[in-house]
Amino acid sequence: MVFDFDRTINRRGTHCFKWDSQPMNDDPELLPLFVADMDFQTAPCIQQALAKTVEHGVYGYTSVWDGYKDAVISWMKNRHGWDIEKEWILPFPGIVPAIKAAVRTFTKPGDEILIFKPVYYPFDASIRDNDRTIVEFALDEQDGFYSIDFEKLEDLLKKSDIKMVVFCNPHNPIGRVWTKEELKKLGDLCLKYNIMFFSDEIHMDFEYGDHKFVAMLDACPELKEQFISATAPSKSFNLAGLIVSNLIIPSECTYKQLKKEMDNSGIMAPNLFGLVAAEAAYKDGAEWLDALLAYIEGNFDFMKSWFEENMPEVKMRKPEGLYLAWADFRGLGLSDEELEDFMLHEAHLWLDEGYIFGNDGSGWERFNCACPRSIIETSLNRIKDAWQKRQEAQR
């Protein structure tokens, strides 16, 4: 089947956070490439499954069915070679709520929780809003490639009293797909210092070239008693509005503790439509996803080449995972405030500014590349034209 990812779909007027937020109303020229949802329609198999559910017309309370969990198990095995068991799967309404629930369950107010910067900014809020202490570890960066200095990390663990790690694999926004060796070292340190490990693996299906996602539990199975993986079809199949995710928890004790927090907080299982969509995605969505990955990789290649040819002072390393590009604008010599103002008011682009991911993101920009290539090209040309206009005005 052929899928048309070049098609531009008008999302304005659909109560869409990306296209209908106030800044879009303030500036009709603004193009949004910030929040991580796609501008593509989801897979036809999902649309068909949802249409069938809508046609039924009864949307009562829903129980998670065995076939749903079977679809999750099959996807993890066939797509990633990861063997999980039905009893490990805890459906949950979203990964950020799951992080917050895990923070409340496995730590106490004031406890230290480690995150690796730059990183997805709701990690900070999930810790801070629950009165825990954020401990930041800066990833090493060289020409856009990020790595973990494990000697420095162990020095930090020795000096601290860290109770939990919230990790991102693949890593948003930097685009790393962590290797099995890196994950094993990290897992061994958490075992050594008795640290709970929460692994946000929502972008697991996005992998390019030789970079293959490895589940943390596959890299370090010994970690299973203090481990939670958070997975979801929401990024892979553009289902963020349906609020569905699956926690993979191999420890019965850990599972029961988190389920108790879920019940005590009144957190329900995902809604009917989210579950139906996720099952359809995992049963029949592989062909569509393969085509999507090829298209997004083409967007990355286009963007990288464009910067090299048109604005070489901007550096971009091709991501190993995600559908988000991480570009280094430090060569323009602008402060964070100046760069943000330039993008919003001169280039008329709404991006995720690098500094919101932590101090180590200063001078960078995150682009959402899950959109038609024409939007990518228009956005890049806006940056070039605005920069040239600024340079001419300063002469």
Image (tube, helix red, strand yellow):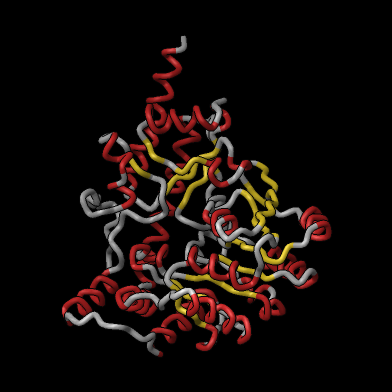
Q: Residue at x 56, y 35 (%)?
A: 363
Q: In which quarter of the image is the N terminus?
A: bottom left
Q: Nearer the viewer, residue 17 or 4?
A: 17
Residue 320 visible in the displayed image = no
Q: Residue at x 57, y 82 (%)?
A: 255
**Coordinates of residue 64 in the picture (x, y in percent):** 39, 85
Question: 163 left or right of 295?
Answer: right
Question: 35 left or right of 25?
Answer: right
Residue 230 visible in the displayed image = yes
Q: Nearer the viewer, residue 170 or 80?
A: 170
**Coordinates of residue 266 in the picture (x, y in percent):** 44, 75
Q: Which residue is drawn at 54% across and 39% down?
A: 364
Question: 361 left or right of 38?
Answer: right
Quick check: 112 above or below 61?
Answer: above
Q: Which residue is drawn at 31% across and 42% down?
A: 22
Q: Number of labelled discs?
A: 0
Q: Nearer the viewer, residue 12 or 133?
A: 133
**Coordinates of residue 160 in the picture (x, y in percent):** 79, 58
As drawn, the residue found furthest toward the top would be: 395
**Coordinates of residue 96 in the picture (x, y in percent):** 49, 63
Q: Nearer the viewer, residue 61 or 293?
A: 61
Quick check: 272 above or below 388?
Answer: below
Quadrant position of residue 130: bottom right
Quick check: 369 above or below 280?
Answer: above
